[in-house]
Amino acid sequence: MVSPVILGVETSCDETAAALVTHDGRILANVVSSQAQLHARFGGVVPEIASRHHLELLLPVLRQALDEAEASLDDVDTVGVTVGPGLIGALLVGTAAAKALAWARRLPLVPVDHLHGHVASLYLEPDPLEPPFLCLLASGGHTMLLDVEDEGGYTVVGTTLDDAAGEAFDKGARLLGLGYPGGVEIDRLSREGDPEAFSFPVARVGGYDFSFSGLKTALLYTVRDLAPDELERRRADLAASYQRAIVRALVERTRGAAESLGAERVAVVGGVAANSELRASLPDAVAAPLALCTDNAAMIASAARYAEAIQFPHYLALDAYASA
Ligand code: KG4
Ligand code: ZN
């Protein structure tokens, strides 16, 4: 066991996660317990159910992380925790636990912004990326283009005007009668379909922003016009064409921004960065490792290395926030 280490805690949505990361960015343990199956029958995350399960899962997940790293709490010298944005009840479970752990051992606590966490998934060993770069952050809650100048933060240059890309995947999957989370299902089914079978619109909005709500409506109308047996037969084609439209919107905007901002390197992070077509469509971009695309605590511990720590005991009044 190499000490000291950073303990990362993440509970902003439906993943309960704890990780142990060294100060130079090596992951010693990264445990994620997804509640996706619990929320699947509701077709999306139910906040109250998420909070309750974080409460049940956090300590077992933390114990597993310590076991995997062959560490004990004595090896932890810093606690990093997601304080927002996310579901407020879910965030409060993680922040309360992190505060208690830090307070009991008189450790400093680092409040981490979840989006900074996604970007910091790129700073971990064995292949850390060094700023500057342009970053496409595409998740279930956000779709942004970020100008990353140093590890401590970024400037937002573009954002979605309505739905996030992951939300478009999830809502599309629901319309197609697929499971939750939708991105993975659409990604899988798309491999069996023809992406040119249907033509879905790629919204053109100003600046470096994104818009996905028109695309979702287009899918809704297309599905409505199909007879049930035809929908069944063409489901894979619909998934592939819909995925193509989302990926095209992300890729076009990212390439355009990189060109006009003169960015030499482009990176992709967030749950949607796990999408196989998106990864293949941006071959020159640095994509976050697959295990670090969807929510995890290693990225939170990573971000904690570059954010300001609050010393014992001043973090006791620290609050979580739902939106950025
Ligand atoms: O980053 P993340 O785990 O949570 C948020 O911060 O929102 O992202 C979750 C999102 C979900 O919308 C999910 O459908 C999407 O990422 N996602 C994918 C894939 N895997 C997860 N979308 C497309 N293709 C995938 N393979
Ligand atoms: Zn996330």
Image: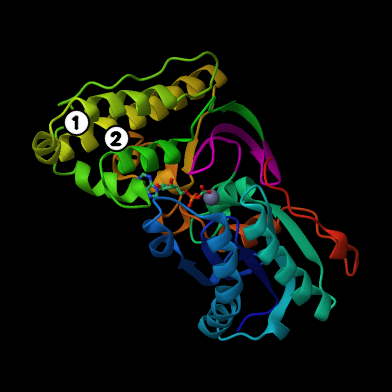
- Cα distance between the residues tagged 1 and 2: 8 Å
Residue 102 placement (x, y as % from top left)? 78, 73
Asked if the residue at label 2 sits under 8 Å from ligand 1, the reply is yes
Is the C-beta of the residue carrying label 1 under 8 Å from the nearest atom of ligand 1? Answer: no
Residue topped by disc 1:
195
- What residue is rendered at 57% in x and 76% in y? 56
Which residue is under mark 2? 243
Q: Is residue 105 visible?
A: no
Q: Quadrant of the C terminus?
A: top right
Q: Is residue 301 above or below residue 191?
A: below
Q: In the rendered view, does 56 fall on the left or right side of 171?
A: right
**Numbered disc total:** 2
- The answer to whether residue 299 is above or below residue 64 is above
Residue at 38 percent of width and 43 percent of height: 170
Counting residues from the N terminus, which is met first, the one under dot 1 or under dot 2? 1
Up-down relation of residue 258 to residue 87 (above or below):
above
